[in-house]
Image (spheres, rainbow, N blue to C red):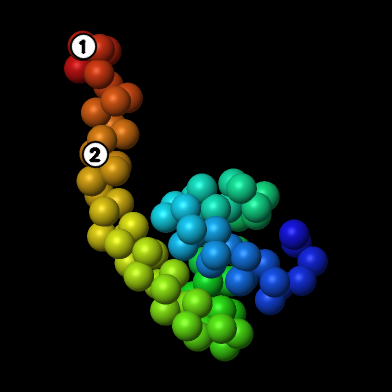
């Protein structure tokens, strides 16, 4: 799906909305970098499909607000049982 940038941006947005997933998960699913996902969603999508952008922006903002919590959980899992 690396060819048509407009289609990719819309497909990324739909995937994130339907699955309520993170940028990292979407990048892995589509085989592209997180930077490319951000570029497609934040820069390209508003000019292509504003209503779709508004929907995906809500999820991106939620993920950004929750990322410090996810990081703490991941760190706790990493060191659980290691004696530290």
Where is residue 18? Give x, y as percent.
Answer: 48, 58
Where is residue 11? Give x, y as percent.
Answer: 62, 65
6 lies left or right of 14: right
The residue at the point 67 percent across, 50 percent down is 31
Where is residue 78? Give x, y as percent.
Answer: 32, 24
Q: Nearer the viewer, mark 1 or mark 2?
A: 2
Q: Which residue is mark 2?
A: 72
Q: Can see residue 56?
A: yes
17 lies left or right of 61: right
Q: Residues within 10 Å of mark 1 (few under 14, many from 20)?
A: few
Relative depth, front residue between 82 and 60? 60
Q: Is residue 15 above or below residue 76?
A: below
Point out the image quarter for the C terminus: top left
Q: Is residue 17 above or below residue 22?
A: below
- Residue projecting furthest to the front: 18
Q: Which residue is mark 1?
A: 83
The residue at the point 61 percent across, 48 percent down is 29
Label 1, label 2: how many angstroms apart (C-alpha)? 17 Å
């Amino acid at each position: 799906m690396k060819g048509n940038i407009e289609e990719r941006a819309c497909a990324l947005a739909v995937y994130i909305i339907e699955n309520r997933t993170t940028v990292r998960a979407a990048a892995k699913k589509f085989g592209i970098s997180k930077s490319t996902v951000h570029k497609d969603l934040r820069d390209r999508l508003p000019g292509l499909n504003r209503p779709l952008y508004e929907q995906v922006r809500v999820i991106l903002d939620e993920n950004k607000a929750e990322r410090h919590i996810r990081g703490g959980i991941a760190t706790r899992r990493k060191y659980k049982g290691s004696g530290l």
